[in-house]
Image (cartoon, rainbow, N blue to C red):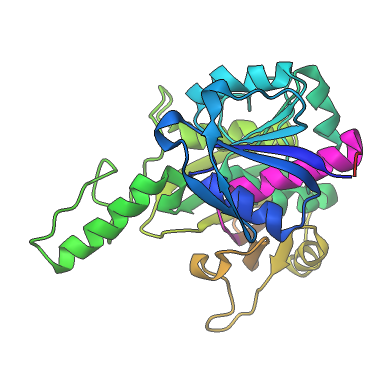
Amino acid sequence: MGYNIVVVGATGNVGHEMLNILSERAFPIDKIAVLASRKSLGTEVSFGDKTLTTEDLDTFDFTGWDIALFAVGSDATKKYAPIAAKANCVVIDNSSLYRYDPDIPLIVPEVNPEAIHGYKNKNIIANPNCSTAQMVVALKPLHDRAKIKRVVVSTYQSVSGSGKAAIDSLWDETKAIYNPTASASQHYTKQIAFNVIPHIDVFMDSGDTKEEWKMVVETKKIIDKDIKVTATCVRVPVFVGHSESVNIEFEDFLDEDEARDILREAPGVMVIDKREDGGYVTPIECVGDFATFISRIRQDVTVENGLNLWCVSDNLRKGAALNAVQIAETLGRECLKKG
């Protein structure tokens, strides 16, 4: 017996990936509906070997549906998620709207699956920020062994994290450099083609950007409130795949070889770490994969009990759609138990 599933925002990048992953992982589905705004009403989307037609989110009745995967912005989520939740359809939300609500669980299934039971508070579960999701998958097994005191992370985030318009902008800007007569729309505050931009989301009074703040707060909520985190988030001219340089300071000594062994056994992690040319993973190699890849594991001798690592993942998958589907799988297995 399967579930009745709704994908909200099915025409967007993340919505497309949600449908792909539901099919790839053979999620038990009895019935599926794909929703979009009225401007995209009637658009056809693929689901496995089927073609589905989008329905109107504004008039959809969530009664009788088990799980709704939301891949729309915070404004639309704020309006429609409570409607779904009130109809007893559990919402798994990919926006930032509910991540910091203490009554709503923020879940990465490999890290804190036990928190799933908190969905009963409001019938809503939050999906973390893309940059946070892949990092905590790597941090949690190490934290369990040696307890993390502080994390310093620099991210190298692909343009797909900003949506289709940003992907188009990188493509157009790149073409325009080689063909000066071509026009190019600039999605970001500065040119992204052949450039890097140390600015993701809005600036806060502290000088941090909202993206950097998210990584701090979400890591504390998911793993341990006592972990100190400082982040610098950078947009890079890569279409898909986020990378992170992560420096970790532990309470206890953790040898790099033991850390490598721990991560090899960790769920959702793939270690590719050879000290030779090409013995590491880059963003282009992780596209379409479920795993979070870890490379460049090594001691940091400049601090007591320090370790460095390189972390790469498909941000449309583990950073968004895959994590949402994994939450749905955990919800079904631990709470709804229909299948």
- Magenta-colored span: 310-337
Q: How many tags in the picture?
A: 0
Residue 267 is left or right of residue 301, and the answer is: right
Give the residue displayed 21% in from the left and 64% down from the top. 175
Quarter-wise, where is residue 338 in the image? top right
Residue 35 counted in the magenta span:
no
Q: Which sits in the foreground, 300 or 240?
A: 240
Left or right of residue 136, residue 201 in this image: left
In this view of the protein, can residue 331 be seen by the observer?
A: yes
Does any portion of residue 153 appear in the rendered image? no
Residue name at image x 65 percent, y 59 percent = 48
Q: Is residue 330 magenta?
A: yes
Q: Main secondary structure of the magenta part?
A: helix
Q: Please identify the quadrant where the N terminus is shown.
A: top right
Residue 99 higher or lower than 304, as above or below: above
Q: Residue at x 56, y 32 (%)?
A: 95
- State the residue in front, 139 or 25: 25
Which image quarter holds the C terminus?
top right
- Rendering coords of residue 306 (x, y %): 67, 55
**Where residue 166 sits: x, y (%)?**
35, 48
Occupied quadrant, residue 333: top right
Q: Residue at x 46, y 31 (%)?
A: 37
Q: Position of residue 128 (x, y in %)?
A: 63, 38
